[in-house]
Image (cartoon, rainbow, N blue to C red):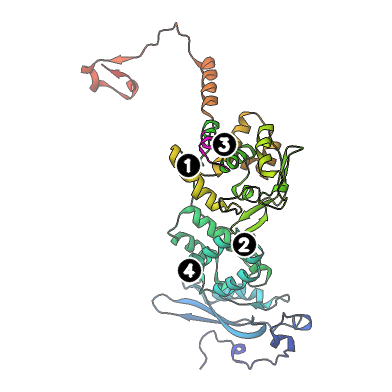
């Protein structure tokens, strides 16, 4: 006896399918194999399951691609509760909506994979094309957070509701959660392009609020103290970073040939990340003019040296490493001087000094390597002297006349209980 809602199509013998050699070879599917006619129109099978909390379950058949081969598999999905769809006709409409994509004439089988399987393939053929400095943190995100939480789920099952649950259950800082979602968005672009998914689970995603902390910024006086207390060649390194505002990887990627003593210019076009020398963050070279005094100091690092040699060398005669430059040289020096920050605080100090000198925004963007003026303004910090000068000017505008007597209404202590809403704000004597 057939159960309610049974569809005879579900028990019909499987149709004969012609499979070309490409389907069994593991090679990408192409040609006539992709253009094969779809299976006949499906209405699926609708089942009501459960007694205390009945739910409508839909079943159908769907073509999927596994390991380069098309397989016809049974699909089963909960459509909703009996409360959501009180009648069978309403539930049938929900099932028809679910099958509309499969019954569409343009439908093609999609590859299926769990998130962990897709992540492994994505890391192999996509992540390796990103900058070397980008790869380690993303691999760490996948290994520590994303794969343990989402690895066992199929890509098609990663819905907006599931993503929101993932964000809500993350016991991590708001910044880390936002970084994880940013990585998922990048991966999702590849998943859509490769046909694994056709939906967007990030459209209505609500992320936790995150207030960016105030970034340290070295004042001109503190920069002078740091340079004076640093030993060679690090005093010159800090001087160069403070004057140009270049990043720590960029100063470690400088070669002798990047310095032109005749025109007093320095070209920043490479950056060191770990053991590799890569392009700069903006992927465009930036040219800086140097002051006569800094150019004179750099001449001792350039004269009679090969243009391909690193401009600055460590005590071991090797190119400076960004991490070691900060941890082994700058941090102990800052602790000695009682200052907080890192090499990035020189960039913020440089941006603030340019703002104080009323440097045009276009020049400031080019020197700092920023695409957006908003990013450049985020590097600008309020100067105490400027703030005090502004307050004095505002005081000249708004200060009341000194000769006028300022009266304050009072009430006696004995009448304190007599205060009413109309007398609030009176001073009790």
Disc number for residue 428 = none
Above or below: residue 376 compared with residue 64: above
- Residue 37 in percent (x, y) is at 74, 83
* Nearest to N terminus: mark 3 or mark 1: 1
Q: Which residues are magenta?
A: 225-232
Above or below: residue 99 compared with residue 159: below
Q: Is residue 123 left or right of residue 269?
A: left
Whether 230 is among the magenta residues is yes
User: In the rendered view of the protein, which quadrant contains the C terminus?
Assistant: top left
Q: Secondary structure at mark 3?
A: helix
Disc number for residue 333 = 1
- Residue on which the image places disc 3: 349
Instruction: Name the residue located 56 percent from the left edge and 62 percent from the top edge.
Output: 136
- Residue on which the image places disc 4: 149
- Residue on which the image places disc 2: 186
Pointers 2 and 4 in contact (CB under 8 A)? Answer: no
């Amino acid at each position: 006896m057939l159960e309610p809602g049974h569809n005879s199509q579900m028990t019909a013998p499987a149709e004969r399918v012609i499979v070309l050699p490409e389907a069994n070879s593991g090679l990408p599917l192409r040609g006539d194999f992709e253009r094969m006619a779809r299976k006949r129109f499906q209405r699926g099978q609708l089942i009501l399951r459960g007694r205390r909390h009945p739910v409508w379950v839909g079943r159908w058949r769907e073509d999927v691609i596994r390991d380069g081969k098309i397989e016809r598999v049974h699909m089963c999905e909960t459509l909703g509760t009996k409360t959501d769809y009180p009648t069978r006709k309403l539930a049938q409409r929900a099932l028809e909506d679910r099958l509309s994509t499969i019954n569409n004439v343009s439908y093609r089988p999609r590859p299926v994979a769990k998130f962990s399987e897709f992540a492994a393939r994505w890391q192999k053929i996509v992540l390796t094309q990103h900058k070397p400095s980008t790869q380690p943190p993303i691999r760490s995100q996948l290994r520590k957070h994303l794969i343990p939480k989402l690895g066992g789920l199929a890509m098609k099952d990663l819905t907006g509701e599931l993503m929101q649950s993932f964000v809500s259950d993350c016991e991590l800082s708001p910044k880390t959660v936002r970084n994880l979602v940013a990585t998922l968005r990048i991966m999702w672009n590849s998943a859509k392009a490769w046909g694994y998914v056709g939906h967007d689970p990030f459209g209505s995603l609500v992320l936790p609020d995150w207030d960016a902390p105030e970034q340290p910024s070295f004042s001109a006086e503190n920069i002078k103290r740091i340079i004076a207390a640093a030993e060679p060649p690090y005093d010159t390194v800090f001087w160069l970073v403070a004057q140009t505002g270049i990043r720590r990887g960029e100063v470690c990627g400088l070669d002798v040939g990047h310095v032109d003593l005749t025109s007093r210019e320095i070209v920043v076009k490479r950056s060191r990340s770990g053991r590799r020398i890569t392009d700069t963050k903006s992927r465009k070279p930036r040219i800086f003019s140097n002051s006569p005094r800094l150019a004179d100091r750099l001449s001792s690092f350039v004269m009679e040296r090969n243009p391909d040699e690193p401009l600055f060398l460590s005590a071991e005669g090797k190119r400076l490493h960004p991490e070691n430059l900060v941890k082994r040289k700058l941090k102990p020096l800052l602790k000695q001087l009682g200052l907080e920050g890192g090499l990035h605080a020189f960039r913020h100090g440089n941006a603030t000094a340019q703002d104080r000198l009323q440097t045009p925004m276009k020049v400031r963007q080019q020197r700092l390597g920023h695409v957006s003026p908003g990013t450049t303004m985020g590097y600008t910090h309020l100067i105490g002297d400027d703030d005090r000068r502004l307050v004095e000017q505002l005081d000249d505008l708004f200060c009341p006349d000194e000769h006028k007597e300022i009266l304050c209404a009072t009430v006696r202590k004995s009448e304190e209980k007599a205060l009413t809403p109309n007398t609030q704000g009176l001073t009790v004597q």
